[in-house]
Image: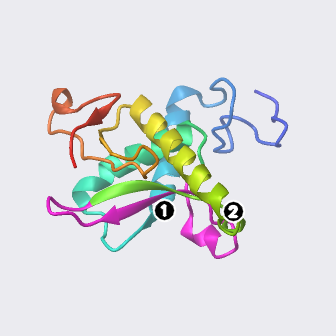
Amino acid sequence: MAAPDHHGHDPGTDGYLGPGPVTGRGARGWREDLERQSAYALDRCIAGPGELPPGLRADALTVVESLLLAGLPVFNVEAAADGDDNGVELVVEDEPGGPVPLAVWRQHPAVSMLGEPFASVQAAMHQAVRGVLSAYGHRLRAEQDEGRAPTILPAGPRGEDMVRGGVAGGG
């Protein structure tokens, strides 16, 4: 059995997915933990004028898994009530072809009071999120402004229809 890490977590046994090799319950337990954590996070990180249609839930779940695997924090509306309101938030926007989620970086509220650093950090984090999602094979809209929040496109009906590791054309 692995010793607890410097945060006091016992990798593979207490649900923590932190750094280091898969230990404890092995890869199957690790995957189950990731799926459970992703479903929990997904239910708390969605905002916007639209709602996530049931057909997009599976895609959104894999987006959250990718963010967690990369170590990026995912926004949690419940934690935001206590002042911990930063991380990646999925904002659902209604478009002519149907609703689409955007992966929006939410900075700590104190940063927004600083003016210009806010805009520069926001653009840098959106580029980082875009890079992570692209690396995990998510379809993203090609944006004119690389600093804009990435728009996540639905997966194609078959794996070969999906543009993996890059962006798909669009407005």
Judge depth for marks 2 and 1 and give the one in front. Answer: 2
Residue 118: name its quadrant: bottom right
SS class, disc 2: helix
For the residue pair 123 and 78, the one nearer the viewer reads as 123
Question: In the rendered structure, which disc, 2 or 1, sits on the residue that comes first in sequence?
Answer: 1
Q: Is residue 47 above or below residue 34?
A: below
Residue at 31% of width from left, 69% of height from top? Answer: 51
Q: Which of 56 and 171 is in front in this view?
A: 171
Residue name at image x 56 percent, y 53 percent: 122
User: For this view, does 31 lie left or right of residue 48?
Assistant: right
Q: What residue type is labelled 1?
A: Cys
Q: Label 2: which residue?
A: 111
C-alpha span from label 2 to label 1 = 20 Å
Q: Is residue 116 visible?
A: yes
Which residue is pictured at 64% across the width and 76% down the height?
Answer: 81
Magenta residues, as a range?
A: 74-99
Q: Mark 1 points at which residue?
A: 45
